[in-house]
Amino acid sequence: MNQQALSREAIEAAVDWLVKLSSGAVSDEVSTQFQSWLDADTHHQAAWQQLAQSMTGFEQVHHLTNRQAGHANAVRQALAGHVSAERRHFMKGGVAVVALGLGTAYLTNRVTPLTHITSDHVTPTGERKDIALADGTRVQLNARSALDIDFSEKQRVLTLHQGTCIVDVSPDALRPLLLRTVHGVVHATGGCRMLAGISGGQSYAMVQQQSLVVAPLHYRQAVLTSGEAMAAWFDQHALTLKPANVNASMAWEHGLLDVRDQSLEEVVESLRAYHTGWIRLAPRAAGLRVFGMFQLDDVGQAMHALQAILPVSIRRYGNLLTMIDLV
């Protein structure tokens, strides 16, 4: 299993365990829980091994990847009271642990998404892109997005692999514009201004001008018009219409995150596309409701603003790690 295959959840859990195990006192119960977590999934083992092996020079930590009997004792010896004061200070400092532990592939992917690196247009973290197509159609790609373009005399097809885009469709009586995702197709005619994206295992689309048709691969289609203020969320086998503020959803084209009663988890997910470091949100703070306007191009300022309006503490270790938790 390569580093790219590791989920963010597995990496976050591995770092959580590292923090817990390096706290200075590890009980038998905690050691047993750690061993159970490690044994539960090969992704857990890979994430832990990546974290430990990346910490060059920390021999004690490397012992934690061994799979022999007495593993719990190795945990205690390595991370409780038998590391030097200098190393314990280093581990508790946070920055170096995460900088090393995330691994080269993970850090590279935080700068530019690697999965669809060969697409026609790919935007790295923190950058938006304005694309003028030959027919006059204009596409704006949000940060960390990937798009392919297939235009010919007979068709106009955009394929969104990742992220979000806004499309201003140029009129063409013979070629409606099709925007494909892995979940289905969005049909748009000239004059349509729409937003489409992929998030959480689903695709979504909404329209600001004119109308569009959303057709999941194996489900009935739906028509959206600009006066409805609705978003179509769909996968291959289902489609759900949800209320949406289209103008707020498109605010990123102006470098703004317009938040109107969203969870902190949703806000952080939007900010991750603009921050190459790692943002760790404590699960107990994820459900806080947020209202406000934030600058996408200044994530540090956005964090200050969040801390000012929510009962959270935000610790930042340079640009590498941001940790958000309840006060």
Image (spheres, helix red, strand yellow):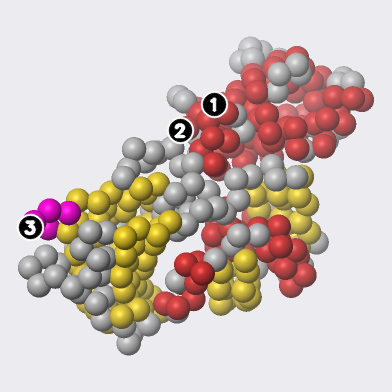
Residue 68 image position (x, y, % from top left): 63, 12
Residue farthest along the bottom direction in this orientation = 227
Q: Amino acid at mark 2?
A: Ala
Dot 2 or dot 3, earlier in sequence: 2
Q: Amino acid at mark 1?
A: Ala
Q: Amino acid at mark 3?
A: Lys
As drawn, the label of residue 154 is 3
Q: Is-magenta flag for residue 154?
A: yes
- Residue ID for mark 2: 5
Dot 1 or dot 2, earlier in sequence: 2
Where does the magenta region start and end?
Answer: 151-155
Camera-near label (1 vs 3) is: 3
- Residue ID for mark 1: 46
Instruction: Depth check: give the residue in front, 291 or 122.
Output: 122
Q: For the residue labelled by badge 2, is the local secondary structure a helix, a strand or a loop?
A: helix
**Quarter of image, res 304:** bottom right
Picture layout, residue 253 above or below residue 313: below
**Quarter of image, res 117:** top left
